[in-house]
Image (cartoon, rainbow, N blue to C red):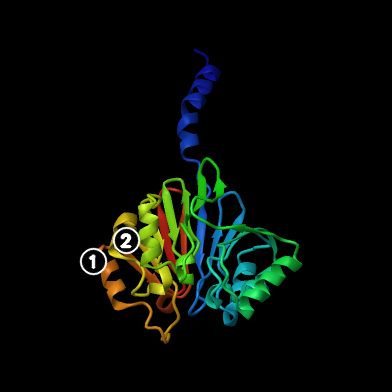
Amino acid sequence: MSALLISLLLIIALLPSCASTVARPRLTAVFLDVGQGDSCLFLLPDGTSMLIDAGPRSAKDAVVNSLKESGIEKIDYLVFTHPHEDHIGGGVAVLEEFDVGQIYMPRTSHTTKTYEDLLLAIKDKGLSITEAKAGKTVVDTTDLKAFFLGPTKNYEDLNNCSAVLCLTYGKVTFILAGDAESEAEKDMLVAARVPDADVLKVGHHGSATSTSDEFLDAIDPEVAVISVGKDNSYGHPAQKILDRLAKAGVDVYRTDVHGTVTLTTNGRDVEVKTER
């Protein structure tokens, strides 16, 4: 057999093993330290981006600067979980500084000056709002899926109206619970839409009224992130929630302790880095 033919056979034999070592694109989730509030940036494997909430108004510059440092020019998917100021306060600044694709918000009759300013900014930019509700799909590709687990219905309590997002890349699933409390958690469980997740963004900054035993058992996360302000006046996170997470063997990261928390995954493993 000629040397050339042997070489060709060796190359062909090696092709499958070479292909298997090609690195998968990575997904990055950046839980920004915005004080007492929420903001999470997803850098998706296909080069698009998703921002979940924009923190309080006091953190608007921090949010905008963090997005710019991440190389963001356009936010392809912008989700406001509910109209409380600590989640939408930086929204106007974000809309002013970046191009935006699709906007998702739950339907609510809640009105404040901050909320009205946000709606006006959305209108001025010529954008429309897609209702965030249980079962609504945001992204659906072979490797990446994102949809809303809640709200399953209308609630008097605005926290329970939170858009709860489930995002899966490969075999890794994130659930971001907004400020959903135990009533909304129960309704999501009854609707049988809550999958196991690797990462949980803990509801309502670790409030005692969220992250029920039943909800935590259903999700069974390995990592939990609590977005919370240092020495806040609400007593967040509640000690009983920290104890509940510890008992479940969950690794907990807090923005008041660790600063910005960054999770990176190839769809199989999750790497966690903290600012401090």
- Residue for point 61% across, 52% down: 47
The percent coordinates of residue 233 (x first, y second) are 42, 87
Relative to 219, residue 204 above or below = below
Q: In the rendered image, is residue 123 in sight?
A: yes
Pointer 1: what residue?
Answer: 247
The percent coordinates of residue 231 (x first, y second) are 41, 86
Q: Secondary structure at mark 1?
A: helix
The percent coordinates of residue 223 (x first, y second) are 36, 62
Furthest residue to the left? Answer: 247
Marks 2 and 1 sit apart, C-alpha to C-alpha, by 11 Å
Q: Residues within 10 Å of mark 2 (few under 14, many from 20)?
A: many
Relative to 146, residue 69 above or below = below
Looking at the image, is mark 2 or mark 1 nearer the viewer? 2
Residue 121 vs residue 107, the one in the foreground? 107
- Residue for point 49% across, 65% down: 162
Q: In the rendered image, is residue 61 in sight?
A: no
Relative to 62, residue 145 above or below = above
- Residue for point 59% across, 71% down: 66
Q: Secondary structure at mark 2?
A: helix
Pointer 2: what residue?
Answer: 216
Please state which amino acid type lies under the numbered disc 1: Lys
Please state which amino acid type lies under the numbered disc 2: Leu
| Count of numbered circles in the view | 2
- Which of the two labelled residues, at mark 2 and mark 1, occupies the earlier sequence position? 2
